[in-house]
Image (tube, helix red, strand yellow):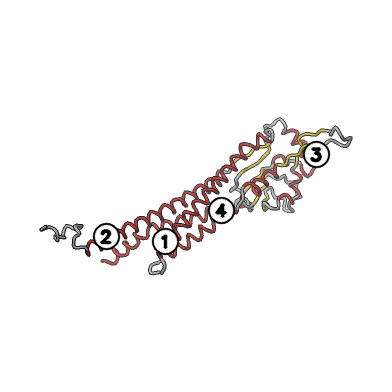
Amino acid sequence: MFLPFTLFYKLGKRIPRVLVLITSFISVFLLVFLLVGCYNVDQSSTYLVKYQFNDKSPLYPVISNQFSSQEYTDGLENVQIFSGYMGICINNIPSNYDRNSSSKSSKVCFNRKKVDDMDIFDDLTIKIFSFKNSNSTEESESSNLNILELAHQNSDELVHPYLLMVVTIFTILLFGITVYAIIPKLPFKNYVQFIIMGLSALITLLWAIGAIWTHVAINCNVSLIPRASMNIMTAEKGSKSQALSWTAFTFMLIDCLIMWMVYFRDRKKLDEKLDDVKSTKNPFSNKYASDTTLSSV
């Protein structure tokens, strides 16, 4: 009869740490999905920013004519570029274009470091304006714009995956340490508690910086790309990546709050027990109603 009660009591004491275990486990998966976004075709829906040519722009027919001037680039004005943490994906590649892959797939993904080495990188360069140099009699020069280069700069130079990698590793470490803390009768539990508290606070702080950094970078792309390109290109934020990022941060914040609340709760109980011990040893203490030492004074 007392066994179930004791079991439930012990489980009840561990519920906060179990919640931390569950939320940190979920956070790891969310961060991993966010990290590998656009690394391959299967993860192409988890993008930070989507770039494409604006078909409502007055210059769109000029762009379309430039791509149709070469047989192998015909139809490239319809491509969509997805920028992620680890890679870049290109969608709506024409079936006649086979310079990037022998499979003639309509969607391909590249490592963010190797995009400028691909043939399609040069093929997506468009000439906006042509003008002659007044000091030269040579052919006219042109102002070039590359939609793939913008996505490459966003993934490689603006939004770095390194902070996300560090946070993912720390979250996995937090999960493992929390498992250790839940197992009964293991040594160094007090030290483990302090490690969990410090690690959860560090993770929350780091990813708060990372999530805000990414949020600002994405919104800058969405706001500035159309204006900087004279409305030739459009940029759209990835709602899935935003949801993964802020949901993971919410779980991290919950972990941090739970562990610090558990610490202050345990500290309060310990202080009360110490007060009880001091009161029982003090003959002049009037803490308990049953203590009648001073009742006759």
Furthest residue in direction left, as rendered:
296
The amino acid at mark 1 is: Gln
Tag 4 or tag 1, which sits nearer the N-term? 4
Q: Residue at x 86, y 34 (%)?
A: 135
Q: Which mark is residue 193?
A: 1
Report which residue position mark 4 lands on: 33
Q: What element carries label 4?
A: helix
* Residue 68 or residue 177, whichever sits in front: 177
Q: Residue 69 carries which label?
A: 3
151 left or right, relative to 15: right
The amino acid at mark 3 is: Ser
The amino acid at mark 2 is: Asp
Q: Is mark 3 on a helix, strand or loop?
A: loop
- Please state which of the two labelled residues, at mark 1 or mark 3, is closer to the viewer: 1
The answer to whether one can see residue 88 in this image is no
Q: Residue at x 61, y 43 (%)?
A: 49
- Please state which of the two labelled residues, at mark 2 or mark 1, is closer to the viewer: 2
Tag 3 or tag 1, which sits nearer the N-term? 3
Q: How would you rate the neighbour count of disc 2 (Cα within 10 Å): few for under 14, some for 14-19, many for 20 or more?
A: few
CB under 8 Å between callouts 2 and 1?
Answer: no
CB under 8 Å between callouts 4 and 2?
Answer: no
Residue 41 percent across, percent down from the top left? 64, 52
Q: Is residue 198 above or below residue 72?
A: below
Report which residue position mark 2 lands on: 275
The answer to whether one can see residue 66 in this image is yes
Tag 2 or tag 3, which sits nearer the N-term? 3
Q: Which residue is drawn at 45% across and 50% down?
A: 253
Q: Give me the C-alpha separation between circle 1 and circle 3.
A: 67 Å
Q: Give me the C-alpha separation between circle 1 and circle 4.
A: 29 Å
